[in-house]
Image (cartoon, coloured by chain):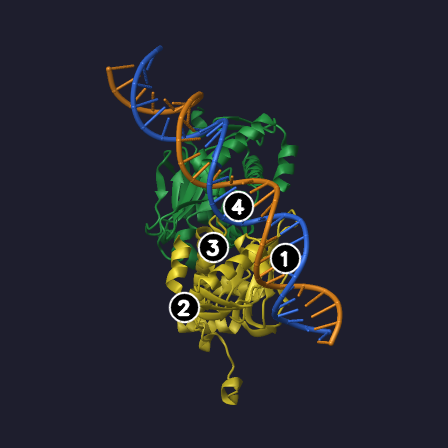
Chain colours: A green, B yellow, C orange, D blue
Amino acid sequence: MNSVLANLKIDCTNCRLQHLCIPRGLSKQDIQNLSDLVQNDTLVHKGDFIYRQGDDFYGLIAISAGSAKMLSTDSEGNENLTNLVLPGELIGFDGVATKAHQCSAVALETVNYCKLNPAELDVLCNQFPSLLRELFSHSCEAITESQRNPGHKNQAASKKLAQFLLALSNRLMSRGFSATEFNLTLNRQDLALYLNLTPETISRLFSKLHKEKIISVTGKNIQIVNSEKLKIIATE
Amino acid sequence: MNSVLANLKIDCTNCRLQHLCIPRGLSKQDIQNLSDLVQNDTLVHKGDFIYRQGDDFYGLIAISAGSAKMLSTDSEGNENLTNLVLPGELIGFDGVATKAHQCSAVALETVNYCKLNPAELDVLCNQFPSLLRELFSHSCEAITESQRNPGHKNQAASKKLAQFLLALSNRLMSRGFSATEFNLTLNRQDLALYLNLTPETISRLFSKLHKEKIISVTGKNIQIVNSEKLKIIATE
DNA sequence: CGGAAACTTGAAACCTTTCAAGAGTCGTGG
DNA sequence: CCACGACTCTTGAAAGGTTTCAAGTTTCCG
């Protein structure tokens, strides 16, 4: 590893995810103000909880590396997987209104994250309205997203899976990763929870898409072989 | 109608929905500040659009009377019904981040609404951080809600319908309406869109619940006859 | 009052789930 | 480094529930 690079302090002013994270659209001065409030680069391992449903509000968190899943247990005790979180995305909004988290965030692999603590969020609210405005914008975007893409509609299972794979491919590409080959950090059970299917159905669909040479599946390694056909399946 | 009451100007400081709407948790001074920025009581009729998907951001809107549905057409041209909106609820967040609305809001009956215009939202952002903070809190709540209750999970159709009816009953009750008898402002087609079922299935379920004397259905008039049994169906 | 739209009801088809069993993968310990 | 055990994944067959297609009935509104 390059030790010069390794010693550079990473903060918001030089983060490679600026265009996705809170700094998006902010002035240099605002990014500096933000950077002074943010706690950078906490590391957690696969399976660790970043926060748990029921915890006191832990802060707004930006995933800087790795991926995480959002879990929420409803009043009947059923566990739902509500989101897959990639680098540059913000989580923690579920603890703002009630001061206690309504979801759990679990690392799917080694994860680095930055955090704006509750106290610093208050500082920001009082002193830097433009930053708060940006956070407001982020949260509104999350609403729109979760309302417009209720990924769990009663569509054909193959359509839901194709849409998931294409969306993931796009999200990975916009983060600088390969759009055609990637590692699925969710296992079949988690993916089934997310898409409202059973693990068996997921497995059958993967096999079918593999046989048809539309994707190549080797365990969690996925290659998109024929994205055109995949798009056709995604639109039916 | 009582003319004295009718002539009283309704604003945020005397609104009966204070406990649900933006003023929730604000100081008297903040409510006054808010009230000065809000445009009160616009009236629209059944079928009218409050705003359309694609419109420039129209403002944050609080429904003060009546009900509305939120529609969004996805990239494939399929129309989804993402929400039923009741008095005291805020809409318009879908236009904040992009400055253009990602959903349409359509009145299901005569609707009155109050509006915080984009320009006033900016004033608020710069001058009254505590109000902006409250809005941020509202938007975070909406995220939590839409992520935790993806009302359209692949559950038994009867369970989804029972859950919908019970949730609607609770929401109406907390707004001062009857919890056991109400008018369904959504038609079967809209309800089917919302629950991800077909109108035929909705119709069959209503007939079944009616025969079993769990609810009484006469067109759009719904009475909850046996809420205990309905709760059992809702939890399976 | 009449026509269009919304709603209801029936029967068959289709797709996912469920249940079951076997195959593959991973990590730990000998 | 290999072996074992647990867990995950795959595959098959049957069952069940919603959708689809179709036709009839009711409601609403001009």
Q: For residue B158, which numbered disc appears in the image?
A: 3
| Badge 3 or badge 1: first in the primary sequence | 1
Can you say whether B98 is above or below B17 in the image? Answer: above
| Badge 3 density bin: few <14, some 14–19, many ≥20, Cα 10 Å | many
Near mark 1 (Cα within 10 A), the count class, few <14, some 14-19 or many ≥20, is some
Task: Measure the alpha-carbon separation of dots 1 and 4.
Answer: 20 Å
Residue type (three-letter) at the residue carrying disc 1: Gln
Residue type beneath disc 3: Ser
Q: What is the spatial separation of the Cα atoms under label 2 and label 4, in whole angstroms?
A: 36 Å
N-term-proximal mark, 2 vs 3: 2
Q: Nearer the viewer, mark 3 or mark 1?
A: 3
Q: Which residue is mark 4?
A: A151
- Could you tell which of marks 1 and 2 lies nearer the N-terminus? 2
Compared to residue B225, the image places residue A187 above or below, namely: above
Instruction: Give the amino acid type for the residue marked by disc 2 in the picture.
Output: Leu
Disc 4 and disc 3 in contact, CB within 8 angstroms: no
The x and y percentages for residue D30 are 73, 74
Q: Residues within 10 Å of mark 4 (few under 14, many from 20)?
A: many
Question: Mark 1 sits on what residue?
Answer: B53
Q: Residues within 10 Å of mark 2 (few under 14, many from 20)?
A: some
Disc 2 versus disc 3: distance between alpha carbons?
40 Å
Which mark identifies residue B26? 2
- Residue A99 seen in render: yes
